[in-house]
Image (spheres, coloured by chain):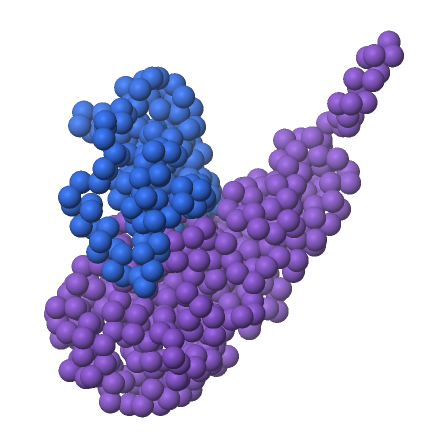
């Protein structure tokens, strides 16, 4: 990883009130509490930014699931961050439709502009760049996902203004 | 442009709003269905000839009739909105433009099969659309269409969204079940089929989002009306997704059996820069590709696509122009399958990696004369030898691209630099002897 600290972990690993409430709500959707694991991991990622071993252990304890099972699930799904990521997670789609419309050019352009390679984070911890598999936005290619939301029909100008806006916030 | 009136993506502004939806005849089908016997609802769906829109084209009414009407265990419905097949992006259009028709269809399906809990599985990346659908579900709860005593009846249904987290394989129905149970999304062996042993071992039906969105108009207008739309063997409309080298990409709702050339030139505005077409993927990346010279007069539905050895899949059409490097495209598709293989079955887990490495060296000008045969061999050994259809999905593009675009592969191989095959152990021994 290029650069040093990305996100320092809070001292205490504990869900905030809001997330504890959301977890109870999620548990009520299923006949068995362990089915709420994926929801719990989402909440954890929202609160802590990524899923460290300690966080996974905490989530496992909350739901009465062994850590190994939690790790297995977290590792299986690509959207759970098992490593710290920057404040803005730039996930550029390079699958077939985007590739035909210049998805790799977008990756190269951002990589050059931010001076980071794929899977790397800028030294200030602002941006992480990754190549993503099809994000279901083929009609508006090329596109990328920035944290939770999509940025579609990308052009150099659009990327420039987006990165400018994000680096200021 | 066309006389066809869309069934799902209707041209009504703000249809996503529940009041607008009700004003335009929404939730009347639910009331009508609740007044019918469950068997009558299933019969209507059977009569309509509706087939699953997730790719397998299984008759929906028949699938529903597999559910036991009387069961000691609870029963479940899962709506499959994983939509991870490259080139398909239709379900998000439904969530955005007409979520209530999907919700209504889901509720009717629940009534028909005696289900009290339904889960909507949506891929994790669709955060915006999860928010939109949740809003729609909340509105429907408030109006009494979901929850206790729906639509004033004695029937109660709950509807929950389950957010995925980035795994293509969770679109496979049994992998989806495991994912909802909070496990790794690995497909299960069938039998037992989900209708007898699904979520938590209970009878479960899995339907695609688009399939369920088709249910309310079928109940409203009757099965016979629906069966007359499009091709008789694949009735109804399809949400065709156009992407790639095309002027007007997007989702187009048209009757099944619409001409592919019409889709590309009439609706899609033609190929970008007016170039000729080299390759077309007719229904999502796993479907066997077509050559540009195969599309004249070709109707887009499952039966007609079989005549050119392909399938409709999810109707996600990728158009590629004459300058496209077929080997590169197939390599990219194979990379996707290599990344997404759940790793359960050896032929798929190992085979996808082998195919990717061989395609990579052909693409990088280091292909060997025997590589094309080797690729075919690996693909043939994946196909049909895995628990789920993922293996076929990974093997088909490679196998059929070689069959249909052999000169492209041969050209790359013949232009390759002939690099002697070195074996590390062997070369070490040589050094030692010197």
Q: Is residue B87 visible?
A: no
* Position of residue B146 in the picture relative to residue B194 (left or right): left
Tell me: residue B391, above or below residue A164. below
Quadrant for residue B322, please give it: top right
Residue A104 versus residue B352: which sits nearer the camera?
B352
In the image, which lettered chain appears purple?
A: B
Residue at 53% of width from left, 61% of height from top? B188
Residue B132, given in percent of the width and then of the height, sits at 22, 56
Q: Can residue B306 be seen in this view?
A: yes
* Position of residue A27 in the picture relative to residue B47 (left or right): left
Residue A153, given in percent of the width and then of the height, sits at 32, 42
Residue at 64% of width from left, 37% of height from top? B357
* Position of residue B305 in the picture relative to residue B407 (left or right): left
Looking at the rendering, in which quadrant would you find the N terminus of chain B? bottom left
Question: Which residue is farthest right?
Answer: B433
Residue B247, given in percent of the width and then of the height, sits at 39, 50
Residue at 60% of width from left, 46% of height from top? B349
Residue B32 versus residue A9: which sits nearer the camera?
A9
Residue B91 versus residue B338: which sits nearer the camera?
B338
Question: Which residue is farthest top?
Answer: B434
Image colour for chain A is blue
Tell me: residue A28, above or below residue A50. below
Looking at the rendering, in which quadrant would you find the C terminus of chain B? top right
> Tag count in the figure?
0
Tell me: residue A23, above or below residue B357. below
Residue A147, given in percent of the width and then of the height, sits at 28, 38
Residue at 50% of width from left, 46% of height from top? B340
């Amino acid at each position: 990883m290029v650069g040093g600290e990305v996100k320092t972990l809070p001292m205490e690993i504990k869900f905030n009130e809001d997330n504890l409430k959301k977890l109870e709500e999620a548990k009520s959707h299923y006949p068995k509490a362990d089915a709420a694991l994926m929801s719990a991991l989402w909440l954890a990622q929202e609160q802590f930014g990524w899923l460290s071993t300690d966080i996974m252990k905490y989530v496992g304890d909350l739901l009465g699931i062994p850590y190994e099972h939690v790790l297995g699930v977290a590792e299986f799904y690509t959207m759970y961050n098992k490593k710290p990521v920057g404040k803005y997670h730039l996930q550029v789609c390079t699958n077939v439709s985007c590739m035909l419309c210049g998805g790799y050019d977008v990756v190269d352009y951002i990589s050059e502009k931010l001076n980071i390679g794929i899977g790397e984070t800028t030294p200030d911890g602002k941006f992480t760049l990754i190549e993503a598999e099809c994000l279901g936005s083929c009609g508006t290619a090329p596109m990328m996902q920035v944290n939770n939301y999509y940025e579609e029909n990308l052009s150099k100008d659009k990327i420039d203004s987006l990165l400018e806006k994000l680096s200021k916030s | 442009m066309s006389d066809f009136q869309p069934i799902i993506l209707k041209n009504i502004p703000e249809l996503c709003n529940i009041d607008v939806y009700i004003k335009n005849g929404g939730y009347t089908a639910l009331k009508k269905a609740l007044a019918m016997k469950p068997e009558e609802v299933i019969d209507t769906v059977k009569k309509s000839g509706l087939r699953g829109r997730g790719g397998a084209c299984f008759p929906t009414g028949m699938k529903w009739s597999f559910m036991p009407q009387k069961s000691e265990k609870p029963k479940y419905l899962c709506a499959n909105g994983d939509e991870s097949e490259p080139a398909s992006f239709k379900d998000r259009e439904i969530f955005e433009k007409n979520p209530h028709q999907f919700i209504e269809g889901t509720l009717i399906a629940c009534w028909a099969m005696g289900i009290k809990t339904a889960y909507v599985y949506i891929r994790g990346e669709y955060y915006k659309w999860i928010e939109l659908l949740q809003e729609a579900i909340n509105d429907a709860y408030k109006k009494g269409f979901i929850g206790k005593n729906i639509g004033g009846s004695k029937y109660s249904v709950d509807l929950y969204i389950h957010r995925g987290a980035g795994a293509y394989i969770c679109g496979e129905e049994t992998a989806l079940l495991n994912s909802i149970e909070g496990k790794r999304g690995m497909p299960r062996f069938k039998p037992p089929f989900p209708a007898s042993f699904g979520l938590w071992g209970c009878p479960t039906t899995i339907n695609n989002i688009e399939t369920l969105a088709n249910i309310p108009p079928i109940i409203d207008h009757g099965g016979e009306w629906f069966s007359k739309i499009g091709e008789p063997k694949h009735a109804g409309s399809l949400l065709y997704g156009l992407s790639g080298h095309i002027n007007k990409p997007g989702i187009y709702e048209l009757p099944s059996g619409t001409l592919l050339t019409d889709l590309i030139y009439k609706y899609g505005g033609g190929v970008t820069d007016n170039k000729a077409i080299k390759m077309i993927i007719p229904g999502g990346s796993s479907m066997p590709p077509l050559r540009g010279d195969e599309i004249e007069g070709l109707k887009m539905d499952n039966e007609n696509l079989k005549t050119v050895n392909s399938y409709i899949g999810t109707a996600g059409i990728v158009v590629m122009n004459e300058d496209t490097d077929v080997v590169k495209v197939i390599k990219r598709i194979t990379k996707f399958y290599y990344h997404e293989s759940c790793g359960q079955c050896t032929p798929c887990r190992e085979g996808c990696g082998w195919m990717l490495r061989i395609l990579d060296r052909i693409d990088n000008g280091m292909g060997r004369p025997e590589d094309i045969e080797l690729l075919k061999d690996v693909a043939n050994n994946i196909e049909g030898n895995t628990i789920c259809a993922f293996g076929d999905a990974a093997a088909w593009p490679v196998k059929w691209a070689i069959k249909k675009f052999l000169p492209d592969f041969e050209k790359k191989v013949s232009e390759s630099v002939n690099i002697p095959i070195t074996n590390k152990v062997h070369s070490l021994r040589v050094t030692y002897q010197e």
